[in-house]
Every structure is written in C-alpha cells, then in structure tokens.
C-alpha cells in the first residue's frame, strides 16, 4: 500500500520531480567537470564533462530502439498465432 501511495504522490507532483531530477543531474555534471580528475583518460572524449552519462544514455536509447525493431520484425506474434 505504501508503494501505491508513493507512486500516486509522485504522479501528482510530476513537474517537481522532473525539476529535482534535472537539478540533480546538473549538480552531477558540475561536480564531474570540476572535481573529477581527467588525467588518466584514455581518449580525448573522456575529458568532456558528463561524457559517460551521455554515452550511457545514448546506449540505452539504441538498445531500446533496437529491441523494439527486433521484436516487431518477428519475435512478437499476434494473439491468434496458434489459431492459424
């Protein structure tokens, strides 16, 4: 029951939750830019602030789009699959 109430509360305050998450992300990017040492980076892109966050986000998007395409290309079957 507590989880349901929490989800309802978060849905009612969605704009506030989004603003808090964006603020938290901005703080993390600033901390990465100013406090994390980039001396041992292997490539020049790793020296960019928030490179690994952007890389991970793009990777997740590619996995989601690829799995949806793969699913619609033949894995997913209609409900009447066995009736044919």
Image: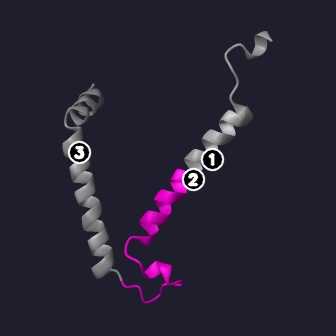
Tell me residue 48's x, y (percent).
41, 78
Residue occupying the point 33% across, 75% down: 32
Question: What residue did someone put label 3 on?
Answer: 17
Q: Quadrant of residue 80?
A: top right
Tell me the distance, in whole angstroms, between the alpha carbons under discs 3 and 1.
Answer: 29 Å
Image: 57 above or below 12: below
Q: Is residue 32 left or right of residue 39?
A: left
Image: 79 above or below 32: above
Range shown magenta: 37-62
Tell me residue 82's x, y (percent).
77, 14
Labelled pair 2, 1 in contact (Cβ < 8 Å) = yes
| Number of residues whose C-alpha sits closer than 10 Å to that of mark 3, classed few (under 14), some (14–19) or many (20 or more) | few
Image: 45 above or below 25: below
Labelled pair 3, 1 in contact (Cβ < 8 Å) = no
Question: What residue did someone put label 1 on?
Answer: 66
Tell me residue 30's x, y (percent).
27, 73
> Which numbered disc flags the more N-terminal residue, 3 or 2?
3
Residue 38 is tagged as: none
- 12 or 7: nearer the eye? 12
Question: What residue did someone put label 2 on?
Answer: 62
Element marked by disc 2: helix
Element marked by disc 3: helix
Residue occupying the point 47% across, 87% down: 40
The verdict on residue 6 being magenta is no
View extreme (right): residue = 84
The verdict on residue 48 being magenta is yes
Residue occupying the point 67% across, 16% down: 79
- Give the quadrant of the N terminus: top left
């Amino acid at each position: 029951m507590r989880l349901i109430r929490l989800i309802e509360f978060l849905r009612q305050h969605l704009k506030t939750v989004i603003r808090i998450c964006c603020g938290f992300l901005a703080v993390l990017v600033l901390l990465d830019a100013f406090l994390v040492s980039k001396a041992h980076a292997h490539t020049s892109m790793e020296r960019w602030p928030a490179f690994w966050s952007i890389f991970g986000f793009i990777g997740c998007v590619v996995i989601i789009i690829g799995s949806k395409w793969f699913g619609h290309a033949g894995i997913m079957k209609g409900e009447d699959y066995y009736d044919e």
